[in-house]
Image (cartoon, grey):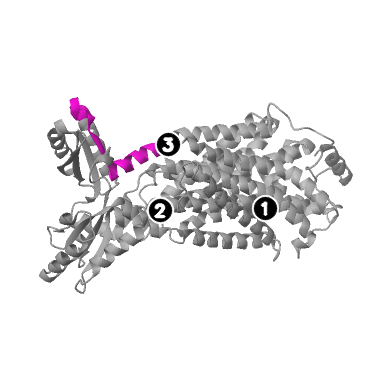
Amino acid sequence: MLKGFPSADTTVGILVYSHGAATLTAQERAAIADSATALASGSTVPDAVRPQFSDDGTAALVAVPLSSATVEKDVSAAATELRDTAARGLPNGLTTQLTGPVGFQDDIANSFAGADFRLLLVTVIVVAVLLIVTYRSPVLWIIPLAVVGAADGLAGVVVRALAEPLGLTVDASISGILSVLVFGAGTNYALLLVARYREELTRTPDRFRAMRTAYTSAGPAIAASGGTVALSLITLLLASLSNNRALGFACAVGVVVAILFALIALPAALVVCGRGLFWPFVPRAGEHADDRAGTTGAAEGSSARASAGAGASGLTTREAHGFWAGLGRRVSRRPLVVTVSAVVGLGVLSLGLSGYAVGLPQTAQLLGKPDSVTAQTVIDRSFSAGLTSSTTVLAPTAVADRAETIAQGTRGVESATLGEAHDGLTRISVSLSSEPESDAAFRSVEALRTAYADAGGQVARSLVGGSDATALDTNNAAKHDQDLVIPIILAIVFVVLLILLRSLVAPVILIASVLATFFASLGASMFLFTHVFGFDALDSNVTLFAFLFLVALGVDYNIFLTTRAREEAGLHGTREGMIRALASTGAVITSAGILLAAVFAVLGVLPVVALTQIGVIVCIGVLLDTLVVRTVLVPALVFLLRDAFWWPSKPHRSGHHA
C-alpha cells in the first residue's frame, strides 16, 4: 500500500557524530552543520537534512533521505559517498559513523565481501588436511577432493541457472551454506565408498570386481542417505519465507549433485587410478585371508558370504581385535548401563535449553564492531534507542487524528506524527523507544496492532508496518515454517528408514536417537552462546536450519551403521552382526563425522551471527551423534532389543553364525 505514496521509494542513511563521551564544542557543532549542508545536496529531500543534537551535548546525528532504488543498485557506493561527504573537513577528534538502514545494509554486504572465496578456501584446506590424516596417503586424498570440488562447482552453476526462472534469490549466505553442505556431504560419501573399496581390495586381485562389490554394498546406503537429506531440504519449498525456500532448493540440488558425483565420477576415478592410489599402504589381495575373526572359520565365512551375495564379510584380525570391535563387545555386556548413561548425558546437555530464546536485535546480528553497530550504541546512549528504526502506520484518512492519538498513548511509543495522504490513507510516522528489532520493539508493535484492533470501526483497519514490524512478521513466519517443516522432515526420514531397513521398530529408535542428539546439541550450544559467545538469543531461522542439517545428516551415520548391521546379522545374528558392523564402519564413520563437524565449523569464518550459530550447533550435534549416539547408544539399544529391533522382518539368515 505504501507504493502509491510520494515517499515510498525512500530509505535513509543516518550519520552519527561524536567526540567520544566529550561534549561537542562550538567549532564541532559548526562543522557538523556544514557537513549536513554538504549531505543535503545528495538527498532526495534536501530540506529535511538538518543536524539534531543530543540533550547531553555529546553527539549529533544527521538523517539523509535517499532513493531506495538508487541505494539498492549499489549500496556500497551510496554508503561510501555518505561517509566521505560527512567526514570531509571535520576537526581532529570528531568522528562520524554511518548507521540506519543504509549503514546496516552496507555492513551486512561487506560481511559477505569475498565470502564465497574465503569460505571455499578454508573448507578446501580443512577437508584436504582431514583426508590426508584419514587416508595416511599423500596421493589418495586428491581424488575425493577433486571430485567433490567439481560437484560443488557444478552445483553452483545449476542452482544459479534454475533459481531465477523459479523466482528464487540465491544470495551469498545461501551460496556459502551450499558449498559447506556439498563438501561435507560429498566427502562423507566418498570416505564411505573408498573405505568399502579398500576393504574389498584385500579380498580380490581384480580392482574392477572389488569396486562392483563395494558399489553394490555401499551404494544403496549412500543413495538412501543422500536422498533423505535432499528430500528433507526440499520440504523448505513449503516455507513462507522466500529465503528459506531458496536455501532448501539450492541445498537439495547440491546434495543430489554430490550423490551423483560420489556414485558415478568417484568410482570411475578410483578404478582408473588403480591400487597405487593408496600408497604407501597399498591393499593387497589375500593379505588378511588367512585370519578371519569370529568363531566361524575362513571356509565358513567364505561360504556364508557367497550365499549372502555382495557385501557381508568376515572381519580381519585387526578389525576383530581392534578398538571398535572391543568397544562393541564391552557395550554388549552392559547394554542397559550404557543406554542409561548415554541418555542421562544427553539429558544433562539438554538442560541448556532453559536459556532458549529466539530473536536477535539488529545490532547483535553481526560479529565484531562495524560502524552501524557502534553508531547505534552512541544513539542508544544519547538519543532514543528506536530513533534509527522506522515504524509506519497507515490509517484511514477520516480517522487519522484518532489513530495518531492511539499511537501516542501506546506503551513503548516515543512519538507519532501525521504525514502524507494517498488514496484515502494517511501515513503516520512512529518512533519507538526501544532498540531496533529487539523484544521490546516487537512488544510495542504488537501493542500498537492490538490497540487499533480493540478500537474498532475504521481505526481497526489501520496497518502497522516498518522495519521492526517486518522483523516481527519474519520471526512469526519463521516459527510457522518451523512448525510446518519439522514434522514433514521426520515423516520423510521415517519412511526412508522403513523402506531401507524393512522394520517398524528400527526407524523409531533411530529417529528418537537423532532427536535426542538435536536437543542435546541445541542445549549445549545455548549454554555456549549465552556464557561464552555473548549471544542472548538465536537468530530466527537457526533452529529450523540446525534441525534440518542435524536430523538429515545425523540419520546418515545411523543408516550406514544399521544397513551394515542388518547385512552382517543375516550371517551372524543380531548381536554379533552389530559388533561386526561397528568394527567395520567405526573408523570411517567417525572420520566422516569429524570431517563434517569441522566443515560446518568453517561457517564461523563469516562475521554473521546466524551462520556462526548454525555452524556451532551442527558441529556439536554431529560430534555427539558420531562419538556417542552412533558409537554406543544405538548399539546398546540393538543389544537390548535383539531381533525385535528388526521387527516385523528378520535379517535373512544364511549359513552358520557366531
Q: Residue furthest right?
A: 299
How many residues crowd mark 1 within 10 Å: few (<14), some (14–19), many (20+)? many
Q: CA distance from mark 3 to mark 2?
A: 22 Å
**Amino acid type of the residue tagged 2 in the rendering:** Val
Q: Quadrant of the C terminus?
A: top right
Residue at coordinates 77% horizontally, 52% vertically from top-left?
199
Residue placed under numbered mark 1 in the picture: 191
Quarter occupied by residue 66: bottom left
Q: Is residue 456 above or below residue 425?
A: above
Quarter occupied by residue 478: top left
How many residues crowd mark 2 within 10 Å: few (<14), some (14–19), many (20+)? many
SS class, disc 2: helix
Residue at coordinates 67% horizontally, 49% vertically from top-left?
262
- What residue span does the magenta drawing correspond to? 453-480
SS class, disc 3: loop
Q: Quadrant of the N terminus?
A: top left
Q: Is residue 197 above or below residue 486?
A: below
**Amino acid type of the residue tagged 3 in the rendering:** Ser
Residue placed under numbered mark 3 in the picture: 240
Residue placed under numbered mark 2 in the picture: 609
User: Looking at the image, is mark 2 or mark 1 earlier in the sequence?
Assistant: 1
User: Looking at the image, is mark 1 or mark 3 earlier in the sequence?
Assistant: 1
